[in-house]
């Protein structure tokens, strides 16, 4: 299976929604604490599986997350450790990039998510406790959502409702928002410890998953959220990222500081259906391809990016 070695520590990996062989990776020097960052755009090669870098962009600070535009196949948005949000056009050479840079967040920007239904706007979540809404053609953010009492680690759009998103915070809450409303529409005290990640079910727009420092993944239904639909135990340390499958309703992937990537089917009793231990440092980034069913990618602090088919060994050559 293809493996890419980055010069810095991996933070995030995202498959292109337009090209099944393309993915982007966000990386940071010195574990993101101090130093530069780099965004890599990778191409998977057919035949003998391999991966090559098509272009890379250097940044003066850590890159914590990256996402593809849903409207322009060559455009990437990056969340940067200096509080900036930068937009890159991969069809242009590095000296012509970034094509836009926004400097509004007061602290590190930890996540970025492009609206999959409207395809004209995106969200950023920051350690300054806020979420911001942006449009590609606006010179500044449209709105700032400020309710969380601590770092917001992730904000993610609902896959069916273009005005609805969820945010996961170190204040131990998951909040649901509608951009047409003045404040959050729902507060779910999901865990007793920091919530590091959240994602929506792609087949049921009322179901989400959260992951936490408490080592669990929890699945929630916003129609009755007093108790979770499922609590998934199996990781040995904090669960850094959680992602619902774009192809299977009940399948969830997660990655953790225990260096593993886990696959869960939250609808069955023995929910843990796969565990991959290919990383040798914290596993912090994970994605599942929308275009190729079962194709997964992960990255971690071991500076490696793995791409593999579900059920296969990521390290198999």
Image (spheres, rainbow, N blue to C red):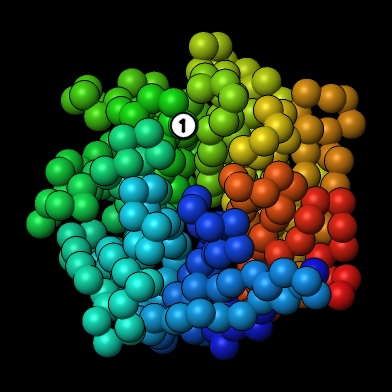
Image mark count: 1
Point 71% across, 64% down: residue: 307
Q: Nearer the viewer, residue 65 or 32?
A: 65
Task: Report x, y in % for residue 169.
Answer: 44, 44
Q: Is residue 181 left or right of residue 168?
A: left
Q: Determine the residue positioned at 51% across, 22% down.
A: 205
Q: Is residue 131 visible?
A: no
Q: Is residue 167 above or below residue 228?
A: below
Say if 47 sits above or below 54 in the image: above
**Left or right side of 221 for 136:** left
Q: Residue 215 location in percent, x, y?
A: 70, 47
Q: Secondary structure at mark 1?
A: loop
Residue 175 in the image: state x and y as whole percent. Answer: 41, 31
The image quadrant where one finds the N terminus is bottom right
Name which quarter of the figure residue 155 lies in.
top left
Name the residue located 80 percent from the left edge and 75 percent from the top edge.
Answer: 48
Can residue 64 be seen in this snapshot? yes
Residue at the far top in the pictured view? 224
Task: Name the residue tied to disc 1.
Answer: 159
The answer to whether 117 appears left or right of 100 in the picture is right
Residue at the extreme front: 47
Q: Which quadrant of the view contains residue 15?
A: bottom right
Q: Is residue 33 left or right of residue 244?
A: left
Residue 232's place in the image compared with 112, above or below, is above
Q: Quadrant of the C terminus?
A: bottom right
* Residue at image coords 85%, 47%: 274
């Amino acid at each position: 299976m293809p493996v890419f070695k980055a010069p810095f520590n991996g933070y995030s990996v995202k498959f292109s929604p337009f090209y099944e062989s393309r993915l982007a990776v966000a990386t940071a020097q010195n574990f993101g604490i101090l130093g530069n960052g780099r965004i890599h755009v990778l191409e998977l090669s057919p035949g003998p599986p391999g991966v090559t870098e098509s272009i890379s962009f250097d940044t003066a600070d850590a890159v914590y997350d990256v996402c593809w535009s849903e409207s322009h196949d060559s455009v990437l948005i990056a969340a940067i450790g200096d509080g900036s949000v930068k937009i890159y056009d991969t069809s242009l050479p590095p000296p012509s990039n970034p094509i836009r840079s926004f400097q509004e967040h007061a602290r590190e920007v930890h996540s970025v998510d492009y609206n999959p239904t409207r395809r004209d706007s995106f969200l950023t979540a920051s350690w300054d406790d806020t979420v911001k809404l942006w449009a590609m053609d606006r010179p500044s953010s449209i709105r700032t959502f400020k309710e969380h009492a601590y770092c917001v680690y992730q904000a993610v759009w609902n896959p069916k409702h273009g005005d609805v998103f969820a945010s996961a915070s170190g204040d131990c809450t998951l909040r649901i928002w509608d951009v047409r409303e003045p404040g959050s529409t729902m507060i779910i005290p999901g865990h007793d410890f920091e919530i590091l990640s959240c994602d929506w079910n792609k087949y049921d727009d009322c179901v989400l998953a959260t992951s936490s420092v408490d080592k669990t993944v929890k699945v929630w239904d916003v129609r009755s959220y007093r108790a979770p639909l499922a609590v998934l135990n199996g990781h040995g340390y904090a669960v850094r990222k959680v992602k619902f499958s774009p192809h299977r309703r009940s399948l969830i992937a997660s990655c953790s500081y225990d260096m593993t990537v886990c696959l869960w089917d939250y609808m069955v009793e023995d929910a843990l259906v796969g565990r991959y231990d290919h990383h040798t440092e914290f596993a912090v980034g994970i994605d599942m391809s929308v275009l190729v069913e079962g194709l997964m990618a992960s990255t971690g602090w071991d500076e490696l990016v793995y791409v593999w088919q579900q059920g296969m060994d990521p390290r198999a050559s």
